[in-house]
């Protein structure tokens, strides 16, 4: 479970970089980039909760 949490945190850190690159290349709109950024925050937050839960169990 800790590994799954780490993966979520890694995705939460990687998605914003990908979103910015896609927006700079005009592959997605600004609104889509913001949705990706919110999804990245959620991935990181859920990953942090999972990792913390795995360490306490």
Image (cartoon, rainbow, N blue to C red):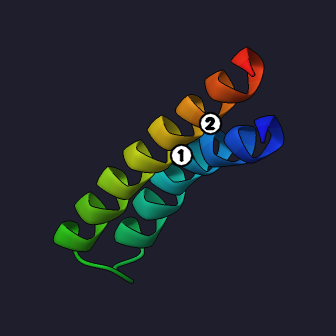
Q: Horizontal placement of 4 versus 36: left or right? A: right
| Residue linked to disc 1 | 12
x and y percent of residue 27 in the render?
39, 83
Q: CA distance from mark 2 to mark 1?
A: 13 Å
Residue 2 percent location from the top left of the image:
78, 35
Q: Earlier in the sequence, mark 2 or mark 1?
A: 1
In depth, the one of 44 and 33 nearer the eye is 44
Give the position of the C terminus as an image quadrant. Answer: top right
Does 31 sit above or below residue 17?
Answer: below
Residue lying at 54% horizontally and 31% vertically, measured from the top left: 49
Name which quarter of the figure residue 32 lies in.
bottom left
Percent position of residue 33, x then y:
30, 65
Residue at 17% x, 69% y is: 31
| The quarter of the displayed image where residue 48 is located | top right
Q: Secondary structure at mark 2?
A: helix
Residue situated furthest bottom in the rendering:
27
Q: Residue at x 38, y 66 (%)?
A: 24
Q: Which residue is mark 2?
A: 50
Front label number (2 vs 1): 2
């Amino acid at each position: 479970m800790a590994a799954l949490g780490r993966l979520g945190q890694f995705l939460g850190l990687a998605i914003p970089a990908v979103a910015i690159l896609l927006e700079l290349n005009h592959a997605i709109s600004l609104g889509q980039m913001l949705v990706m950024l919110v999804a990245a925050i959620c991935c990181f937050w859920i990953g942090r909760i999972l990792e913390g839960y795995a360490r306490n169990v």
